[in-house]
Image (cartoon, rainbow, N blue to C red):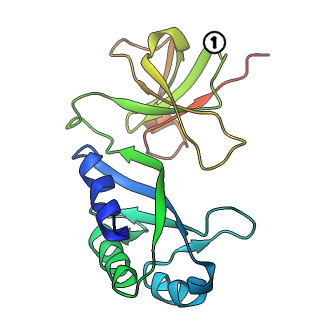
Amino acid sequence: MSLAGDFEEILAALPPDWTDLEVDLRIDDERQYVDSAVALSQVNAQPYSHSEWHWRLLVAHSFGHAAAAETVEGVLAKLDAEGVSGEMRVGLANPLPGPNRSEPKVHLLDADGASLILYWNETGMGLRERSAFTSITVVDSLDEAVHLERAVAPDTAPSAWVSAQRSSLPQTDRTLQINPA
């Protein structure tokens, strides 16, 4: 399949509320690297220095500091027309935070084996037992040093909660591990 076709399949597999996406790209013929890099500069592709993958593409759904999905698809179609072939893999796709999600999905970063999870969203932050999260699945991470999981956040109140008005944490939906002393 073509690069643009592969990218369309990736987009079709995402939930409708995705916000941003990281895709790794590798081309089959490295003699086409320089010409491909020129085309990919239109979407600010980030080259890897020493990796089996050549570029990371940062893609935004409707807002953000990344290339628009339509623009990325257009650049990949241009590479297809020039005879460039290769493959892609999805690194991370983030769901849109807020009440319009069907399930409050979150990412757990290096939380394997943790008993407490520090969780924060637009209303504040709190501690939750890891066992309160459901549907925990391991997700491939672009950074091999990070153990990444996706889970559904609980509807129950956390053990402790600090309102966002009293917190300096950024107003984003994230989940991190707390290492109990």
**Position in image of residue 156 (x %, y %):** 36, 11
Q: What is the quadrant of residue 43 in the picture? A: bottom left
Q: Is residue 156 above or below residue 4?
A: above
| Residue at 33% over, 41% down | 97
Q: Secondary structure at mark 1?
A: loop
Report the front residue among 29 and 40: 29
* Amino acid tagged 1: Ser
Query: How many other residues sit within 10 Å of disc 1, few (<14), some (14-19) or many (≥20)?
Result: some
Q: What is the quadrant of residue 5 in the picture? A: bottom left
| Residue at 45% over, 16% down | 133
**Position in image of residue 66 (x %, y %):** 42, 68
Q: Is residue 45 above or below residue 32?
A: above
Q: Is residue 85 left or right of residue 7?
A: right
Q: Is residue 127 left or right of residue 6?
A: right
Pick the quarter of the image with the N terminus: bottom left
| Residue at 41% over, 55% down | 21
| Residue at 39% over, 13% down | 157
**Position in image of residue 180 (x %, y %):** 73, 16
Name the residue tied to disc 1: 115
Q: Is residue 66 above or below residue 16?
A: below
Report the front residue among 106 and 16: 16
**Position in image of residue 24 (x %, y %):** 52, 60
Report the front residue among 14 and 131: 14
